[in-house]
Amino acid sequence: MKNFTFAATIGIPRALFYWKRPYFWEAFFKNLGCEVILSPQTNKEIVKMGVEIADPETCFSNKVYWGHLLWLEAKCDLIFVPRLKATEEKLEYCLKFFGIPDLAKILVKTPILTETFDPRREKTEKTFEKLGKKLKKNKAEIKKAREFASLKEKELKEKEKQEFLEKIKSKKQKIVLVSHPYNLYDDYVNLEIKEKLEKLGAEPIFIDEVPVSHYNDRSDIIRNSGYPKFHWEFGKEIMEKIQEILKYNLAGAIEISSFQCGCDAVLKEFVEKEFKSNKIPFLYLMIDEHTGQAGIQTRLEAFMDTI
Amino acid sequence: MKLTFAYWGNYTIAFKTLFRELGLDFIPPEKTNPEAIREGAKISPELYCFPLKVNIGNYLPALKKGADTIVMVQNVGGSCRQRYYGQVEKKVLKDAGYNVNLIDFRAAPKDIYSTIKKISGASLWQILKAFRFCLNELRLIEKLEKKAQYFRSREKIKGKTDQILRLAFEKLNKIKDLKELSRFKKEIFKKISEIEVDENRDLPRVGLIGEIYTVSDSAVNFGVEEKLGREGIEVHREMDVTYHLKKAIFPWKDWQIQRKIMPYLKSTVGGHGRDAICEMLDYIKKDFDGIIHLLPFSCMPETTVRPILQKIHLESGIPFLSLSLDEQVAEAGINTRIEAFVDVVRNYHKYKKL
């Protein structure tokens, strides 16, 4: 078997779907022998760059993504922008993800490394092989890299679960933060809401951390509760996790939504209904490039006073 | 059970026929007007797309008159928010104090058939007959709209076409059987062909692309089509109900579209995102003088493809105007932008041959 010595520098924007599987892509490409450049944590410059170039009506998370993409321009050989279409459970991602590689090609001159991930059409294994072929790697190398990356991901998930169990035991007021991973983990985007809440004496829990067992038959839960059967992966995930977290004693719930997010407009209706019917105080926060630190602080303080 | 349904431009006439022929008890929705839009926007979720707010505004008067069931189609637009219209509308109306039932079905022939069977109890023969009548009417309405696009820009007496069209739709509303419809068809086509026109005028042509609901309902888009026509511009529009139905029935239509737009977009983005790109490329090939892109504010598929449309516009140099519509857009603003655009189009038409 020939061993190619093709090692490209691959840039990964630290936004949007990076947060869906953090560390995975980084580990995957590193194991393939590529050098990986991650764009830095979101900062003012990046947001400004993104907002200037983006379509004014697209969602704030997308604008941040363009900022990261522009930061990577000319700093690497390839920029990795996958086209995520569906999950393994055959649920769709947000449809704005579908067009991102094509829009990225318009924005930057650096070549884009992309592959369509759609388990409804093609096995994920094969997609990874195709992706590896573009980097001139053989099947065995791809398989090894992928497994290694998944292992690392699993380890982190396990750690997260332990942390969650500890958090849930704490005697502080527990507040659940409902949002997409790219809003929860990006501290600049969510205006450090986690630290703010901690300073106010609460125990913030990310909805993302809530473990859900995937083997339970949850079809009757869906039938009994009032929300529709979502075809979006996050819709199903968030609603299920809310059902799970409601079993614990919650003090309040906050939903963070990026401005102009089309999916959240749907989701909010049902998330709000779910919490209100369980008599849990609910706060809806909208974030965009104009949101100020002070404004959020006041609202959080007021919210903490009510509970 | 009293049904009501969404209002959609002139096509509502055909939908009404369908319900009547099936022997269902229904109350037609309120015509879209500023009042209805305002009322709808008041109780709808703020960030939801514009058509939902209009829909709710259309339902409200019908609900006040005694309707208690809403009929809504799911997944008309692939994977966009339209899928949850029924569910969200039900919730919003419930919060506003209207306890409504919801008949929500997928836009597949089998589901449509079973739903109709369930609510009306009509026989298969009756259903087929009703659909035939409805489709005939739809085709007639679309043909009239297409004819009007041609005649409006060339008529000698300004406003004649619109006058005839308005009367025609009023008459069409009262037609009860197929024989009458075919008689009416002959009569109205004769009337239209009698409009005095300036055949030899070399007119600039503009293509109307974008989201299907905003493009084909003149009450929602402030009559963009009529306004351009009166300025002496021939407007073309592919998007209508038959186009959508054809795409739903024949899947290869989608594949053909995908093949045409391959250099720009390699995947579906839901809704009619791909169609907008395909139509724009088509109009450029046919040597049009301008493109108007209409979309509801923050429509997910259309905002995703808009940067691509803008790229095509920069590459080809064709005048391009993108108008987002929602309850806060005023007619005066749209008028100014269209007037400016008309000037650009006229100049482009005049000088592109030099």
Image (cartoon, grey):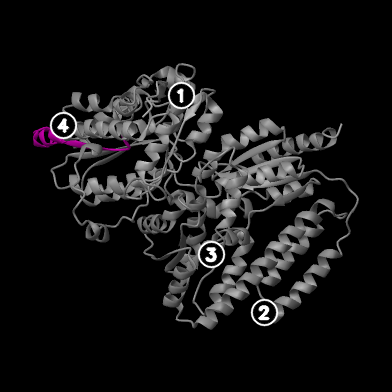
Which residue carries the number 2 mark? Answer: B178
Which quadrant is the C terminus of chain A positioned in? top left
Where disc 4 sits, the SS reads helix
Residue A188 lies, in percent from the top left, at: 34, 23
Residue B196 lies, in percent from the top left, at: 89, 59
Residue occupying the point 39% across, 29% down: A137
Residue B324's mark?
A: none
- Write the start and end of the magenta stretch as one range: A161-181
State the separation of the CA atoms marked 2 and 3.
24 Å
- Could you tell whether B251 is left or right of A133 in the image? right
Which residue carries the number 1 mark? Answer: A78
Name the residue type under label 3: Pro
Circles 4 and 2: CB atoms closer than 8 Å? no
Q: Nearer the viewer, mark 4 or mark 2?
A: 4
Which residue carries the number 4 mark? Answer: A159
State the separation of the CA atoms marked 3 and 4.
56 Å
- Residue B327, compared with residue B107, is above or below; it is above
* Labels 4 and 1 within one chain: yes
- Residue B115, compared with residue A146, is above or below; it is below
Which residue carries the number 3 mark? Answer: B29
Categorize mark 1 by other alpha carbons within 10 Å: few (<14), some (14-19), many (20+).
Answer: many
Name the residue type under label 2: Leu
Where residue B165 sits, quadrant-wise, is bottom right
Where disc 2 sits, the SS reads helix
Q: Earlier in the sequence, mark 4 or mark 1?
A: 1
Where disc 1 sits, the SS reads strand
Q: Chain of mark 4?
A: A
State the separation of the CA atoms marked 1 and 3.
54 Å
